[in-house]
Amino acid sequence: MRHLVLIILALATLLPSLAQAYDILVLQSSHNTAYDTVLKNFQTTTNASQRVIILSDYAEVNAARIVREDRPQLIFAIGDTAVTATSKIQSTPIVTAMALDISSRHNVNGVTVFAPPKDYLKLFKKLKANRVGIVYNPSKTGWYLNKARKAADQAGFKLEERTVRVPREVIAQLNSLAGKVDALWMLPDTTAVTRETTEAYFLFGQQHGVPVIAFASRYLGLGAAAILEIDPAAVGHQAGDMASALLGGASTPRYEELNHTTVKTNASVLRKFSLDSPL
C-alpha cells in the first residue's frame, strides 16, 4: 500500500510537466502539398517541440479543449479552416499561414498570402500599365489597399478602386472599369474573387484588351497574363521565425507580408495583348 501511495504521489508531481509536453500545437487544415511544404520548413526553422493535428482527418476537433488540456505556448494554424478552429482561443499566441482572411483578434499574428504592393507595381511598370483596376471588399482587404494606395501614389500609378460587399456586385463593378484601366489586379479577396466571379475578370480582360494580374498559378490557365505566386517554403521559414520570436518573448508585427514571391507569365496571353514578357 505504501508503495502505491508513493507511485500516486509521483504521478501527481509529473502531471503538470506532462501537460507541458510540447511547445507548439500545429493545426493544419488538410493534406495539401503547399500546406505540407509550409509545415516542413516551419519545423526546420524552429526547434520547439510540436504536436501536429491534420483537421481533415477528424470529424471534429475541439482546439480550445486541446489547448486547455495540453497548454502549448503557441499555436501554428495553416489554412483558413485551421484559423477558424482557433476562434474561441483568446489568450494563447497564434501564428497563421496560408490563410486568406485576416483575423482582428489581439493574439493572432501571421504571414499573409499577400505579396508586397511594390512587387505588383514593378510588374505593372514592366507591362506599361499605369491605370490599374482593383475590385475588393474593404472589410476583407481594405488594410492592404491602404498600403497599395500609398505605394501607387509614390510610384506614379493610378488605382481605379471599386468596392463590393457581396460577390454578386463584382460583375457590375468590373464593367464600370471599361475604358478606364490598363490592367486588372486580382487580389486574394474572398468576396471579390470567388468561383462564381473569377470568370468575369478574364472575360473583361478579353473584351477590353486588358491583362489580368493574379496571385496563384491556377489563374494562368484561366487567362491571367502574369501572377505573383507565393513560395510555401519561404512562408514556412517566415512563420517559423515569427513563432521563435514570440516564444522568446519578442514582439513581432501582427501580420507580415511575404518576403519572397515568384513571377510567372502566360506567353500566349502576353502575345495576344502585344505585351513584352516582364521576366
Image (cartoon, grey):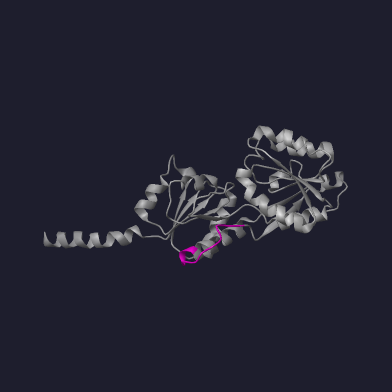
Residue 133 coordinates in the image, percent (x, y): 76, 44
Magenta highlight: main SS: loop
Relative placement, left or right, of 14 versus 49 is left
Residue pictured at 78% horizontal, 39% vertical: 177
Residue pictured at 61% horizontal, 55% vertical: 232
Residue 23 coordinates in the image, percent (x, y): 42, 61
Q: Is residue 166 above or below residue 264?
A: above
Relative placement, left or right, of 240 versus 274 is left
The answer to which of 247 and 144 lies nearer the viewer is 144
Relative placement, left or right, of 191 versus 39 is right
The answer to which of 198 and 163 lies nearer the viewer is 163
Q: Specify whether residue 236 is painted magenta.
A: no
Q: Which residues are magenta?
A: 246-256
Kindly give the residue lying farthest to the left in the view shown.
1
Residue 69 coordinates in the image, percent (x, y): 34, 52
Residue 64 coordinates in the image, percent (x, y): 40, 48
Relative placement, left or right, of 214 versus 76 is right
Q: Quarter of the image holding residue 253?
A: bottom right
Number of marks: 0
